[in-house]
Amino acid sequence: MDTHTRNPRTIPATRWLLLATLAGAALAVVATATAQQRGGPQGHGHGRHAHGMAFDRFDANGDGVISRAEFDAQVAAREAAIDANGDGVVTYEEAKAFRDAQREARARARFQRIDKDGDGVVSTAETSARLVRMFEFLDADDDGQVERDELPPRRGVRGG
């Protein structure tokens, strides 16, 4: 049997990665709505900004609609980016290297957002300003304190 023949019910690893990305984009829509209702910060990889960036990547011609052709092209591009040696399959090592590179890029971008003066170090003033903005976001009723019910629900926690 050909090693590249797949069971039609089997989803290749790259498809799982894409599905996870799309699921994340869908969750970003929910986060955006929540942040907008609370007047919270947007951008910097969260909420509407992140969702919009993901949409824009898929909407290649910028017409505000993702066609099946645009979707398929983005899937193919992502698969090609993960399949480092171009052999048509993704190994664990390739998937891990791709994920690690993405994490590094996100960590660098986060650091650069905090490092407001761009000097390559984060001062206590820069850190304090970020924490103050976080406190102000969490203080939904602007009473100068954060009550437990103002906290967003924890991810991955199920009631029972």
Image (cartoon, helix red, strand yellow):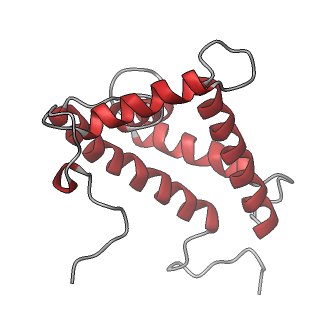
Q: In which quarter of the image is residue 117?
A: top right
Residue appearing at x 21%, y 34% in the figure:
144
Q: Nearer the viewer, residue 150 or 16?
A: 150
From the viewer's perspective, is 70 left or right of 137?
Answer: right
Q: Which residue lies furthest to the right in this view?
A: 85
Question: How far across and down, in percent of the image, does residue 129 sit?
Answer: 47, 24
Q: Is residue 75 above or below residue 43?
A: below
Number of marks:
0
From the viewer's perspective, is 83 left or right of 142?
Answer: right
Residue appearing at x 74%, y 64% in the figure:
90
Q: Which residue lies furthest to the bottom in this view?
A: 1
Residue 49 in view (yes/no):
no
Question: How far across and down, in percent of the image, does residue 36 sit?
Answer: 20, 32
Q: In which quarter of the image is residue 138?
A: top left
Q: Nearer the viewer, residue 40 or 137?
A: 137
Q: Nearer the viewer, residue 151 or 74?
A: 151
Residue appearing at x 73%, y 25% in the figure:
121
Question: How far across and down, in percent of the image, does residue 98 sit?
Answer: 73, 52
Q: In this view, does 3 lie above or below 71?
A: below
Q: In which quarter of the image is the N terminus?
A: bottom right
From the viewer's perspective, is 150 left or right of 62?
Answer: left
Q: Is residue 112 above or below residue 104?
A: above
Q: Is residue 21 above or below residue 63?
A: below
Q: Quadrant of the C terminus?
A: bottom left
Residue appearing at x 53%, y 55% in the figure:
18
Residue 135 in view (yes/no):
yes
Question: How far across and down, in percent of the image, does residue 148 sit?
Answer: 21, 56
